[in-house]
Image (spheres, rainbow, N blue to C red):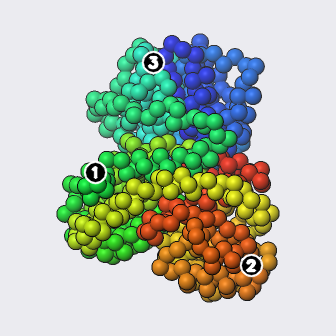
Amino acid sequence: MCGIVAYIGKKEAYPIVIKGLERLEYRGYDSAGVALLKESKINLFKEKGKVQDLKNKAANEDVSGTSGMGHTRWATHGEPNMVNAHPHLSGNGKIALIHNGIIENYAALKTTLESRGHVFQSDTDTEVLVHLIEEIQSKNNLDLAEAVRISLGEVTGAYAIVVMSTDEPDILVGARKGSPMVVGIGKDEFFMASDATPIIEYTKNVVYLEDEEIAVINRKGKLSIKTISNEDVAPAIQELKMEIEALEKGGYDHYMLKEIFEQPRSIYDSMRGRIDSTKGDIHMGGLEEYRNTLMNAKRIIVVACGTSWHAALVAEYLFEDLARIPTEVEYASEFRYRNPVIYEDDVVVAISQSGETADTLAAIELAKQKGATVLGVCNVVGSSIPRATHAGAYTHAGPEIGVASTKAFTAQVTVLIQMALWIAYNRGAINQAKLTRYLVELEAIPAKVEKTLKCAEYAKELAKMIASSDNALYLGRGYNFPIALEGALKLKEISYIHAEGYPAAEMKHGPIALIDENMPVIVLATKNSQYEKTVSNIQEVKARKGKIFAIVTKGDTEVKEMADYYIQVPDCPEELSPLISSIPLQLISYEVALLRECNVDQPRNLAKSVTVE
Ligand code: F6R
């Protein structure tokens, strides 16, 4: 949610900053801007729209300078337009600032600053911060880093910021609280960014800033870090494991399609080193320290948002069905504010692709305050959630750049299946023979996903029948119910068709009123313990002339006969079936979005990483 990138060194900053913005564009894309420092002057270029629009605008301008920073915005305060785009300048034009997050007390600060003669150009909270830094610096005659430090002591809210000043052209100052920030350390050059993706092609050495830390990067090769309370911090340099190829489209038209097709690999990667069916072994190394706590947990609470919340629902079925532990699933945004009852022997599992979702982070903090054990299931290594939780398991799906989550979801479900099996076996809820059978089936999943992906051509055909609809209904029972929700979310977020997911049996309690010959009803009717019940629900839809698009198990005859259109998928145990049945739904959404000429990778109003509440 808002991407920030900055460079200082000997090279030209603009190409590095622009490329970085393109890599970060998944975080927000309603406007973009860059500031370049050259000969004691800040040159500012801003434009509404995509990074490409900014590039077009700057095409014939002087964009030289060896210190620069850029921002791609997802609007919170102030509509997306050129004036509200970052960077923002101080009143005297000497300081520029980019910001990801929200300054919550901006209104009070603005009033005070206005009374001291500051004049604001934009409607943003960010502009208040740059004026505050200017005010504090000039009043106390401070250097930039100190002025930033003292100013941050006066703001409440979340931020990752980078600040430049014409008075100190050889440094950039960055800071974070609640929003991510990585410093890249090259040879005689430094980078700062919201995540490592803009940095990876220049250096693998990075420092993840902690909350309330301020970093000063100096063209002369020096990095210094302090806390807001003025204590020096020794930089903890880490090596990035990511490869640059993982950030490219690799011949696919869209990141989303690439990520859908990567799933045999990403599912395999999320099991690698954890299971071995030949030995009947399962290890969850990251959770080992909390083995006893988990085995004795009276209750598990799973918190997440969006697609990750759908993975949490799958976890509820798994933890209760396999491990026999009572499990509750909560939207992180509701959980954090509704004064929930949390016991010290509760285990809270937080699921997040980005590891930065503000509501999920807040839910984790609340659970920790109440004394619960908090475990994370995250994709982005080194992000905030794995650092905030007591322990956890990474999903290892690799970078997910398409805004609509696909491979991260199936990797989350794969990790949750393994967690459930690990707990179930260690608690004695399943025996060795049963565990081994599941492990054999789990190891077979990547090949089955590969087979399922062959339905891409059928998905195109089905998409043609759905693309002109205004609404769609997704139905499923048991393990297929969360997948119905996820299918509906995928369709609405990238094709803007209104879609609802329902437990198939709930349909008759209301949504059935919507069904007529124009309503596509996508039914997950794979062979599971509730197959016959699902067949009855299909009959109810057909009786009202609804159009049935069924996902069926290969070899099925009954539903195939009833359905208007169908896609066949390989058979597998129902506990693992979300990994298979979500694939055709992802492909259908993708194809529908293409037919409707929507921007698949960057759907309107959305952003990949939601770092504001
Ligand atoms: C939907 C989607 C979002 C995210 C949600 C949580 O395709 O991607 O609904 O799942 O914003 O994000 P994470 O998983 O990063 O916490």
User: Looking at the image, is mark 1 or mark 3 earlier in the sequence?
Assistant: 3
Q: Secondary structure at mark 3?
A: loop
Residue 613 at what x, y percent from top left?
Answer: 51, 56
Is disc 2 placed on a helix, strand or loop?
Answer: loop
Q: Is residue 155 visible?
A: no
Residue ID for mark 2: 546
Residue in front for this viewpoint, 290 or 458: 458
Number of residues whose C-alpha sits closer than 10 Å to that of mark 2, classed few (under 14), some (14–19) or many (20 or more): many
Q: Which mark is residue 286?
A: 1
Q: Which mark is residue 189?
A: 3
Mark 2 or mark 3: which comes first in sequence? Answer: 3
Percent x, y of residue 582: 56, 61
Which amino acid lies under the numbered mark 3 shown in the image of this protein? Answer: Glu
Give how far across and how far down residue 541 sits, in percent: 69, 82
The type of residue carrying mark 2 is: Gly
Location of residue 413 (image quadrant): bottom left
| Residue, far left | 292
Q: Tag 1: residue type? A: Gly
Residue 517 location (% of width, % of height): 79, 78
Foreground of the two, 429 or 193: 429
**First in sequence: mark 1 or mark 2?**
1
